[in-house]
Amino acid sequence: MLIAGIHSEFSKLKTVLLHGPGPEVENMTPATAERALYSDILNLPIAQLEYAQFRGVLKKVSEVFEVKPMLCSILEKDETRSELLVQLEKFSVCPGLSEELSGLSVSRLTNVLIEGILLPQNSLTNFLQQNKYSINPLHNMFFMRDASFCIGNTIFISSMARSVRKPETIILEAVYRHLLDNNSRLVYLNKLAGSKFSIEGGDILVVSPEVLIIGIGSRTTPEAVDYLIGQVSAIQPLNYVIVQELPLEPESFIHLDMVFTLLSESECMVYKPLLESEWHYHTILMKIENGVVRKISYVENIMEGLKKCRFGFEPVFCGNGDPMSQEREQWHSGANFFAFSPGHIIGYARNMHTTNALNKIGYEIIKANDVISGTASPANYKKCLVTIEGSELARGGGGPRCMTMPLLRD
């Protein structure tokens, strides 16, 4: 059973949900990459080698659950299989596809639902379709952070901004509904449709049970934030929400966690322009009492907002704050770190200037393979950065935080 319990971004990780990149990542071409929300195509064997480092480190420090075997287990039940296929058929160009897929073996069906299935070339209409899949591959599913997120003991199924990612939420909804323990809650934000309603996990940061930071931009709307505040307030005390506006472009800014992540109870990683007066996007502080917004006002930046919430975080700058380095490294997820305990984080080795900035303030730099082999242990260091290779994974448009769905922390 899966247990939900997240009260901060940095407390000790107990369990995490992952999905490693598979054939679905290769089931695209340069011509279809943009529709798949990629700026480039990935070399799958290299991406898988890099992901093996990432998974290996997390297995050393937590219990790892993977989507594919869990999906396979729930598809064993005929009722679950039928219900899931009917829902996914809404995203297919082939009517009646659920009946055809119901005859597949469980393992084959599991693969098809994630990797996609080619459109049968049995008509002129199908032949001329620009999209050659009757079930689209879930190219982005290894970015597990987005399609669901956890606050307290509640998992929220996201309302995705792009239709190509909506089937991810349907699959995760089925997994959680059947495997989540009775003391954890499930909220279906994906049931709330509308052009002005979308919210994704990459924009949600849990500072404490009482304080959230939420990004609004191309993937999360103000309307969804208002709704989330009501939902969270109904289940736990929520005192403050800091809202950060994000640019709609470039694509490396799609979520808040691409420019700001929490590393420990006292440190955060920041894309420096986010804090400067030339940054023309607002930061808003909302004071909440009993689920009602009592006060809302602009603040100078996220750091100022956190101070007003009585949190003192010291910023570490992506790219070491150098204008050219910070742009290059932010593009390759240089601000996107995942904390598996306070001051123990995972990031990409390729972002060397950011790594140096962390090393200067006491973070020991450890290679992922040394952790996996047992040569080095994060537990032996007060603060450490475990580096994984990221030449291919970073080109997918996300980093270690993007690739994790933490379920339970101490």
Image: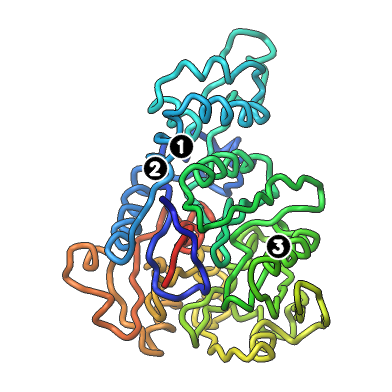
Amino acid residing under circle 1 = Glu
Q: Residue at x 41, y 34 (%)?
A: 72
Q: Using the numbered discs, state the Cα–Cα distance from disc 2 to disc 3 in whole angstroms.
A: 39 Å
**How many residues crowd around disc 1 within 10 Å: few (fewer than 14), some, or many (20 or more)?**
some
Distance, label 1 to label 3, CA atoms, is 38 Å
Q: Residues within 10 Å of mark 2 (few under 14, many from 20)?
A: some
Q: Secondary structure at mark 3?
A: helix
Which is more toward the observer, 261 or 296?
Answer: 296
The x, y position of residue 84, in whole percent, is: 57, 31
Q: Position of residue 399 (x, y in %)?
A: 48, 61
* Position of residue 367 measured from the top left corner of the image (x, y, whole percent): 27, 69
Mark 1 or mark 3, whichever is nearer to me: 3
Q: Nearer the viewer, residue 228 or 395?
A: 228
User: What whole-number distance in Å separates the C-alpha atoms at marks 1 and 2?
Assistant: 6 Å
Residue annotated with mark 1? 26
- Which label sits on residue 217? none
Q: Earlier in the sequence, mark 1 or mark 3?
A: 1
* Amino acid beneath label 3: Gln
Question: Badge 3 is on which residue?
Answer: 231
> On the image, which quarter does residue 11 sit in?
bottom left
Q: Quadrant of residue 275?
A: bottom right
Q: Say whether disc 1 or disc 2 marks the residue closer to the N-terminus.
A: 1
Instruction: Decide: is 361 above or below 17.
Output: below
Q: What residue is drawn where x is 39% and y is 75%?
A: 341
Residue type at the position of mark 2? Leu
Q: Which mark is residue 44?
A: 2
Q: Is 162 displayed left or right of 106 in the figure?
A: right
